[in-house]
Image (cartoon, grey):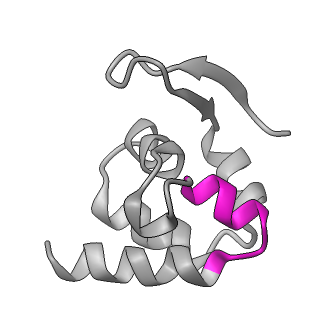
Amino acid sequence: MFGIHFVDPIMPGTRMVRLGRQELDVWLGEPDNFVLAVLRDIYSCDSEVARWLNTPRLEFGGQTAVDLISAGRKAEVEVALIQEWNTR
């Protein structure tokens, strides 16, 4: 598993995976990966990207984007990101 697990001070009781820029690129695939490109467009720093990836979401059935991507369900994450990007 990539990164270092830590407890998010903003969301007590949650565990997050801290990934550096290079680890995000490797974990999500190609450096021009759509998920990563959209997240970096929406959020200004990697800690916000990591928080989004590690936050359980209703649209993911209470799972995180990390869970879905790890399970090969990246398309569901892409749909959610497109919706979020379009609302900004």
Q: Residue furthest front?
A: 61
Q: Position of residue 35 (x, y in %)?
A: 53, 72
Q: Residue at x 61, y 31 (%)?
A: 18
Where is the N terminus found, in terms of image quarters?
A: top right
Q: Residue at x 61, y 46 (%)?
A: 21
Indicate the quadrant where residue 30 lies. Answer: bottom right
Q: Position of residue 78 (x, y in %)?
A: 50, 80
Where is the C terminus found, in terms of image quarters?
A: bottom left
Q: Is residue 78 above or below residue 57?
A: below
Q: Is residue 15 above or below residue 82?
A: above
Indicate the quadrant where residue 70 lies. Answer: bottom right
Q: Residue furthest left?
A: 88
Numbered disc total: 0
Indicate the quadrant where residue 29 lies. Answer: bottom right
Q: Position of residue 47 (x, y in %)?
A: 44, 36
* Secondary structure predominantly adopted by residues drawn in magenta: helix
Does the magenta-highlighted stretch encompass residue 72? yes
Left or right of 7 on screen, residue 29:
right
Left or right of 65 on screen, residue 57:
left
Q: Is residue 8 above or below residue 74?
A: above
Q: Position of residue 33 (x, y in %)?
A: 62, 75
Q: Residue at x 78, y 66 (%)?
A: 71
In terms of depth relative to the viewer, which is nearer, 40 or 13?
13
Q: Residue at x 32, y 22 (%)?
A: 10
From which residue to which does the magenta span run? 64-74
